[in-house]
Image (cartoon, rainbow, N blue to C red):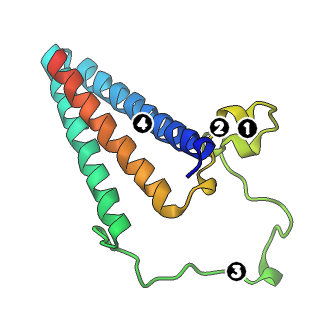
Amino acid sequence: MDAALKKQYIRLIYSKGFRYLSTALVICALVGGIYGSHPHFIFALCAAGAVLIGWGWAIYLRSTGMRLFVLNRGRAKKRIPYVHQRFKGAPPHRPAFLKDYRDFDDDLTSATAIDETVFSKKDAERARMLASVLCGALVIALSFVL
C-alpha cells in the first residue's frame, strides 16, 4: 500500500469509527434520558461498547469464512425479465437517508469522501472491524471516566 492509499485507509477507519461512536452516544443518551439517571447512561455506554466489540469480532469471523447468522444462504434473488419490468430506464427510487456522495454533484467529494471500492473486500472488512473494536474500547473507556 502506498502512502496515499494508507492515508485513505486511515480516513476510512476514522470516518466509520466516528459514525459508530456518534450512533452509540445518541442511543446511550436516549436510554439515559428515558430512565432519567446518570448510572443508566453509564450502563448503556458499557453495553454499547460490549456490543461494538462483539460486532467487530463477528466481522472478523465473517472475514475468515465463518457465518454466524445464516438464514437465506440457498435462496437466490428472483429477477424479473426485462420484458415484464415496468420502469425499464428509470433508476430505482431511494430515500434521501440512503443516498451517499455519488448521488450529488459536488466539487469537494474527492477531498472529503472515502470510497470503499478502492480497497479490496478484505481490507474494507478489516477497516470496519478495526473501527468497531476501537470505538467499542473508546466507549467503554469513556464509561469508566464518567
Residue 55 spot, x, y in % from top left: 29, 50
Q: Is residue 101 above or below residue 23?
A: below
The residues tagged by marks 3 and 2 sit, at their Cα atoms, a distance apart of 34 Å
Residue 88 is marked as: none
Q: Is residue 127 left or right of residue 52?
A: right
Sequence-earlier tag: 4 or 2: 4
Which quadrant of the view contains residue 65? bottom left
Mark 4, secondary structure of its residue: helix
* Mark in front: 3 vs 1: 1
* Mark 1: amino acid: Ser
| Foreground of the two, 48 or 14 | 14
Residue of label 3: 80
Q: Residues within 10 Å of mark 1 (few under 14, many from 20)?
A: few
The residues tagged by marks 1 and 2 sit, at their Cα atoms, a distance apart of 6 Å
* Mark in front: 3 vs 2: 2
* Mark 3: amino acid: Ile
| Foreground of the two, 79 or 42 | 42
Which quadrant of the view contains residue 48? top left
Q: Residues within 10 Å of mark 2 (few under 14, many from 20)?
A: some
Mark 3, secondary structure of its residue: loop
* Mark in front: 3 vs 4: 4
Residue in view at x 40 percent, y 76 percent = 72
The residues tagged by marks 3 and 4 sit, at their Cα atoms, a distance apart of 38 Å
Residue 17 spot, x, y in % from top left: 42, 36
Sequence-earlier tag: 3 or 1: 3
Mark 2, secondary structure of its residue: loop
Residue in view at x 77 percent, y 39 percent = 104
Residue of label 1: 110
